Image (cartoon, helix red, strand yellow):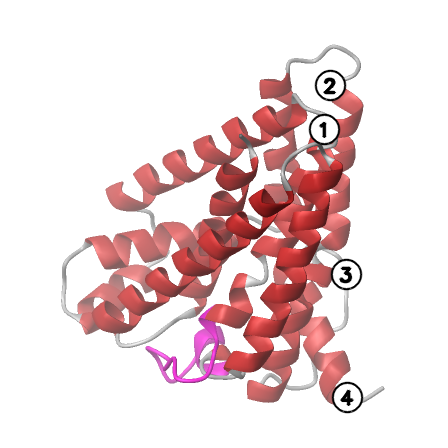
Amino acid sequence: MSSTFLDGWRLAVGTLTVLPTRPPSRVDAAVARIAGVVAPLAVTPVAAAAAVVGWLLVPIGLPSLVAGLLMVAVTTWLTRAIHLDGLADTADGLGSGRPPEQALAIMKRGDVGPMGVVTLIVVMGLQVACVSGLLARPGGAALAGLAICAGRGALAVAARHGVPAARRDGLGAAFASSTPVSVAVGLWVVLAGLLSAASLLSGRPWWQGLLAAVLAVAAIWYLVRLAVRRLGGITGDVLGASVEVATTVLMVALVP
């Protein structure tokens, strides 16, 4: 097994989860490309733990809303809330209306402003509501877990060729333009197939999973386009925001 693949796997696990792993020996475009592609697999233990929480709590009589909240809480804890942090910082930066340099400085400060707070409330509220809706139907816990995994496929889309980095340092610089468009498309074809199959098995029409994947990719594309126009490119925060946006869109599309 090549050192590049191992480093990519370690980068994905170490960045996306709390699971202990050795740090990669290097972080460059080749390693970032592998990390972006294996991200849905790397987060599988997190998604499985969250799904088990929902699967166990609803049958014992706990309201699905409470179970959904606990599923989101488990996911947040097992991912160090890293994507939510990126989402809040991205919302503050893009919502500031400032020139790129000032917006990036706002994102780098580490505190959370009004735009970030409101965005977190809306996104987490949507996720809790959607997960609780999924848990109210057969197979909902597994479908929610799959949405958590598939949402990490956002990294490959956000880091596709042609997307520049807003800064010369940081995780965004390593990921920017690291993934061929064909690889990102191939990954989401697989994810769309899995979502379609899971939708069918849970009693929903197969095309609902496909539609969810298409909407998620469209949302990532728009967010990245906005970041490039307003910030000059992507950052690690934008990558985290793309994951949360994709996951939320998937859940919203799968819940009906």
Residue at left offset 49%, top offset 70%: 157
Which comes sooner in the sequence, label 3 or label 2? 3
Q: Start and end of the magenta stretch?
A: 158-174
Q: Is residue 113 visible?
A: no
Q: CA distance from mark 3 to mark 4?
A: 18 Å
Q: Nearer the viewer, residue 55 or 18?
A: 55
User: What crowding class fits label 3: few (fewer than 14 Cα within 10 Å), some (14-19), or many (20 or more)?
Assistant: few
Position of residue 127 measured from the top left corner of the image (x, y, whole percent): 51, 35
Viewed as shown, does residue 139 lie left or right of 248? right
Which comes sooner in the sequence, label 3 or label 4? 4
Q: CA distance from mark 2 to mark 1?
A: 6 Å
Disc number lying in front (3 or 2): 2
Location of residue 179 with respect to 91 vertically, above or below: below
Location of residue 126 with respect to 157 vertically, above or below: above
Q: Which residue is mark 2?
A: 58
Q: Which residue is mark 4?
A: 3
Q: CA distance from mark 1 to mark 3?
A: 24 Å
User: What crowding class fits label 4: few (fewer than 14 Cα within 10 Å), some (14-19), or many (20 or more)?
Assistant: few
Q: Is residue 42 magenta?
A: no
Residue 54 badge = 1
Identified by mark 3, the residue type is: Pro
Q: Are marks 2 and 1 in contact (CB under 8 Å)?
A: yes
Position of residue 193 measured from the top left corner of the image (x, y, whole percent): 67, 57
Please identify the dominant SS of the magenta region: loop
Q: Are marks 3 and 4 in contact (CB under 8 Å)?
A: no
Identified by mark 2, the residue type is: Val
Q: CA distance from mark 1 to mark 4?
A: 37 Å
Q: Which residue is mark 3?
A: 20
Identified by mark 1, the residue type is: Gly
